[in-house]
Image (cartoon, coloured by chain):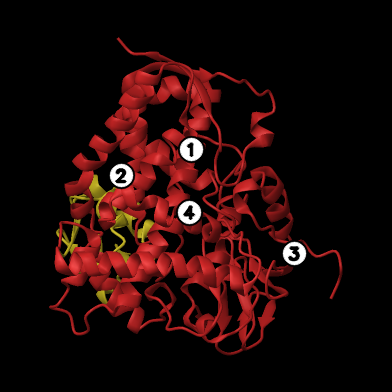
Chain colours: A yellow, B red
Amino acid sequence: MKIRIDVQKCIGAGNCVMWSPEVFDQRDEDGIVVVLEETPNEALWDSVRTAAAACPANVITLED
Amino acid sequence: VSTNLYELPTKQDLVPAEEVEQAFAELREGLALRQVKFPFGGVGWVAARYDIVKSVLEDPRFSVEATSHLADYPRIRQVETGPPRPPAFIQYDPPKHTVKRAVLMRHFSLKRIHEFRPRIEEIVRERLDEIVASGSPADFAPRFTQDVPIRVLSAYIGAPYEDFPRFIDAAHFLGNAYAKTPEDSVRALGVLGEYFSDLVRRKRANPGNDLISWMVNDHDVAEAWTEEEINGVGFIMLTAGHSATASILGGMLEWMVYEPAIYDRVRCDPSKTPAYLEEFLRYLPAGLAGTRTRIALEDVQVGDVLVRKGEGVLPIVHAANFDESVYEGADRLDLDRPAGPPHVGFGHGPHACVGLQLARVQIDVAIQAVVRRFAAMTPAEPDPDWKANRLLRGPKRLMVDWKLAD
């Protein structure tokens, strides 16, 4: 799994950090998403999928 | 126009939840968008299906900002329009909205909210101490379910709790859609505007560790916040923010009090509260629509409906959360619901709720504190029809017999 984000569309809701804190964080200055693990290990995939689905701005795309 | 159109209600705090849920079920049938009679501005479109609600909320051709230039449009609250005034932050469209929202979100990141958590715990503990000192039974609504969000949000923005009498009636009046005439809105808005202007002046002179002070000191951004913008953010937090949080906290506690199995389940493992909360956030209405009317900037085809330029569309998030095609048995609360598409209780798209993490954390803290403090909570005034009598905005009265935990 490879995570792609469209940072221009991010609205800083923080849902990704809530669902998958090992993989996502927010910048201090504006709450915008930071990807900590671009290719997370398989144990985290479920949480990453939930995070992607819960994004209100459809910022997160997952590639196989 | 047909005369038997569904008529959206006002005075949202008095509306039975089941009544609107039945109407919303009918509105999800048939065309992608349905016409209803709005309390203000006549007949307009509503979106009630999950996919359609999300697509309207994501579509930049549907503008929130356009509403600030219109004297009249289909809407659920009189207050959304009025005499021409600069749009508040919440009404901006992208790209301006995107820039301003990023500045605001530095003050609402999960990290910020977690730093604030000890203060929430303190507020919740004080409320429970007071209830315990006053004995059983006790009315948890408003003494807990309303008071916790009021105190938490006032602490967050930096409004001393003692100031609440200056504006809380106006905030309730506007938030629950009691204003009938433009004059009603102007009067209540005046009360809130005067209060926030005074608060901003005090924070400029004597900044604290709170939202208004942080916003006043956001000098490193291209454009500093205007006083109107700061007022607008404070206004939304104390009207929509506080009443929505109180609705969910009150609604969740109501279920726990009437359904001992749910209470025991949360009490058995309080650390699961955030997971249960997500189902409550799907299931409980935090208000009639959860968002504002959008105006089509051009002709837009939405499924099988053509929305003409200038027409209004209101997405109803509670209706979307009850969409059977997305959630099996959507009208049942199910704490074991398998993971599926996320609820849209906090909205969707660029205008999704700014305070969503603050709301989640304070409800989590409040519910965990309750189940740790009390071994059992049962209704002191049992109502066999409690499910049918639930209100859209949560209980106004919740008399509870409580028993302390060992």
Determine which quarter of the picture holds residue B369.
top left
Vertical arrangement, residue B173 with respect to residue B102, above or below: above
Residue furthest top as drawn: B406
Residue B403 locus on image (x, y percent): 41, 13
Mark closer to the observer (2, 4)? 2
Mark closer to the observer (3, 4)? 4
The answer to whether residue B342 shows anywhere in this view is no
Name the secondary structure under disc 1. helix
Mark closer to the observer (1, 3)? 1
Real-space Cα separation, disc 2 to disc 4, in angstroms: 15 Å
Name the secondary structure under disc 2. helix
Vertical arrangement, residue B276 with respect to residue B115, above or below: above
Residue B89 locus on image (x, y percent): 37, 75
Instruction: Identify the residue under disc 1.
Output: B250
Q: Is residue B255 left or right of residue B339?
A: right
Q: Earlier in the sequence, mark 4 or mark 1?
A: 1
Around disc 4, counting alpha carbons within 10 Å, would you say few (fewer than 14), some (14 to 19), or many (20 or more)?
many
The chain to which mark 2 is attached is B
Amino acid at dot 2: Val
Check if mark 2's residue and mark 4's residue have beta carbons within 8 Å. no
The chain to which mark 1 is attached is B
Quadrant location of the N terminus of chain B in the rendered image? bottom right
Around disc 3, counting alpha carbons within 10 Å, would you say few (fewer than 14), some (14 to 19), or many (20 or more)?
few
Q: Is residue B292 left or right of residue B159?
A: right
Q: Are marks 3 and 4 on the same chain?
A: yes
Real-space Cα separation, disc 1 to disc 3, in angstroms: 34 Å
Q: Looking at the rendered structure, which numbered label has been put on residue B30?
A: 3
Amino acid at dot 3: Gly
Mark closer to the observer (1, 2)? 1
Q: Earlier in the sequence, mark 1 or mark 2?
A: 1
Amino acid at dot 1: Gly
Q: Looking at the rendered structure, which numbered label has been put on residue B361?
A: 2
